[in-house]
Image (spheres, rainbow, N blue to C red):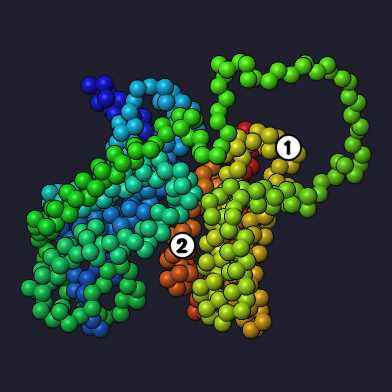
Amino acid sequence: MNRLRALWALMRAGYLNKVRTYRFLLVLVLTIVAGYVFVPAPDADYVTLGWGSSTTFYRGAYDSAWIGAMVALLTGLFLALAGFYVVNDSVRRDEETRVGQIIATTPLSNWVYTLGNTLCNFMVLSTMNAIIFLTAIGMQLIRGEELAINLGVMMAPFLGLVLPVMFLVSAVAVMFETRPRLKGGVGNVAYAFIWMFSLPLLSESFDLFGIDAVLSSMGAAGLARYPEIAHNSFILGYGWGFPVGRALATFTWQGIQWTTELLRTRLLLVGAATVISLLSSVGFSRFDPAREVRKGDEAPLDILDLEEVETRPVLQSIQVQLRPLGEKGRQFRFGSMLWAECRLILGESRDLPFLGMYGSAVAGALIIMGLFLPLDSARGMMLPLAWLLPVLIWSKLGTREARYRTDQLVFSSAKALQRQLPAVWMAGVLLALATGSGVALNMALNGEWPGVLAWGVGALFIPSLALCLGVWTGSSKTFEFIYSLLWYIGPLNQVEALDFMGVVPGSVKAGIWQHYAVFTLVLFVLAFIGRRWQIQRG
C-alpha cells in the first residue's frame, strides 16, 4: 500500500509540473496545427494521404475512420519525437530543486521511482493525445464531408496505435535521464538521431507506428472501389502542387482491422516499455553523492572523522586601501567582454562529452575537408556536419544565467542589455563562422558569391535562434529539439524552404536566404525583448 501511495504521489507531482510548462503548450499547439494541415480541404493545392495519377487523386471520405487514422498516424510520429523533449526532465528537476536529496533519505526503491516517472510521463503524453483526439473531431466537422461522428471508430487508432508508442517514449525518457552519458544535451541530440534514422528502419520490420497495417487496410478498401489504384503511386506526407483540374475520387473505409498480429505488436511495445522502465532503476544512484563518485575521483570527506580535518589558524584582518579607478578603467571595452564570452564557450565545450577531447580535432578536419573537397560535396555534406558539431554549445546561449543562477549578478550590471547580450550573440556567431569557414572559402574561390551570402545568413541565423529560445525558455532543450529537426528536414534532406544554411543550390537561386535574413532579425529582436523583460522583472 505504501508503494502504491508513493507511486501515485510521484505521478501526480510530476504530472502537475509538466502540464504547466511552456514546452507542453508549445508542442501541443504545434501538433494541433500539424493535424489541421494534415487533413487538407478538397480544394487545397496539396495532398497528404492517398493515391494519385496525372488525372485523378483517390482517398477515403473524410469520415470518423479516415480522419481518426490520419490524425493518429501524424500524432504518433510527431509526439514520438517532440513528446520526448516535453517529459525528459523528471530526474533533472528533482536534482535542481533539491527534492532528490530528500528522496535519497527515504526508503523509496529505485524501481518505484523510475516506474512512477514513466507513468507520469505517460499521463502527460496521454493528455496531449486526448486533446488532439478532440481536434480530430473538430476537423471532421470543419471539412464537412461526413458529419456523422463515430467516437469508437475514431478513438480506436489513438488508443491502439498511439498510446503504446507514448508509453515506450515515456520509458526511454526515464532511461536516458538515469544514465549519466545520455542525460542532458547529449541525450537530446542522440534521441533526435534515433528518431530520424533508426525508427524508420525499425518500422519496416516491426510496424512500430502501425502505419503498414493502416495503409494496407486503406489500400484494400480503395482497390475494391477503384481497381485502377493499383497502377497509381501512393502518397504519404505532403505532396505540393496539386494539379488544377485533377479529379478527386473518394471511397469509404470502415476503419482498422484489429488482427492478432497487430494486437501482438502493440502488447510487445507495452511490455518493452515496462522492461525499460524497470531496467532504468538498475545502477541508478538515486541522488546519493557517495554512489555518484566515479573511479579516480576524490572520495567524499567523512565529517565524523575529525582527526583528519586540517585546522588552520584564524587570520587577522588587515586594512586594505583600494586605488580608485581612473577614467580609462571606467570605459566599456566590447572586445574584452566578447573575449570573455568566447572563453566561457570554450570552457563549457571542454565539459561536454566528445567535444572536450576530440571536438577541436573534428572541427579542424571538417574545415579542411570543406575547403578542399569538390564544392557540391563540401556544401552538401561538410557544412551540415560542421554546423551540427557545436549544437550543444549554441544551445547554452541565453540560458547560462538561469543555469548557473547568476542572473541577478549579470542583470544588475551596468547596461547589461546593450553590452552583455550582443557579446553573447557575437560569440555564437564567431563559432559558426569558424566552424563553417572551410566551405565559405571554397565557395568564394569558386566564385559562388550568392552561396557565400546564404552561408553568412546561416551563420547569423543559428545563434539568433539559439539565443531567442534560450532567453524565452531558460532551457537548452528547446533549441536542441528544433534545430535537430530543422537540420534533418532542411539541409540534410535538401528541402529548399527549410534550407537555412544555403546548401541546396536551388534554394540559393530562389533567394530563400533572404527570408532567413528577416527571420534572423526578428529572432534577435525577440531575444532583446525577452532579456529586457527578464531584467525588469528581476
At 46% across and 26% down in the image, what residue appears? 101
In the picture shown, does residue 443 fall above or below 184? below
In the picture shown, does residue 3 fall above or below 235? above
Q: Would you say 142 lies left or right of 395 here?
A: left
Residue of label 2: 486
Q: CA distance from mark 2 to mark 1?
A: 36 Å
Asked whether residue 194 is in view, the answer is yes
Coordinates of residue 97 in the picture (x, y in percent): 49, 30
At 24% across and 65% down in the image, what residue appears? 204
Q: Would you say 215 lies left or right of 519 here?
A: left
- SS state under label 2: helix
Residue of label 1: 413
Coordinates of residue 356 in the picture (x, y in percent): 59, 53
In the picture shown, does residue 294 fall above or below 81? above
Asked whether residue 138 is in view, the answer is no
Is the C terminus in the top left, top right, bottom left or bottom right quadrant?
A: top right
Is the N terminus in the top left, top right, bottom left or bottom right quadrant?
A: top left
Q: What residue type is disc 2 on?
A: Leu
Coordinates of residue 144 in the picture (x, y in percent): 20, 59
Coordinates of residue 47 in the picture (x, y in percent): 29, 70
In the picture shown, does residue 462 fall above or below 348? below
- SS state under label 1: loop
- Earlier in the chain: of badge 2 and badge 1, it is 1
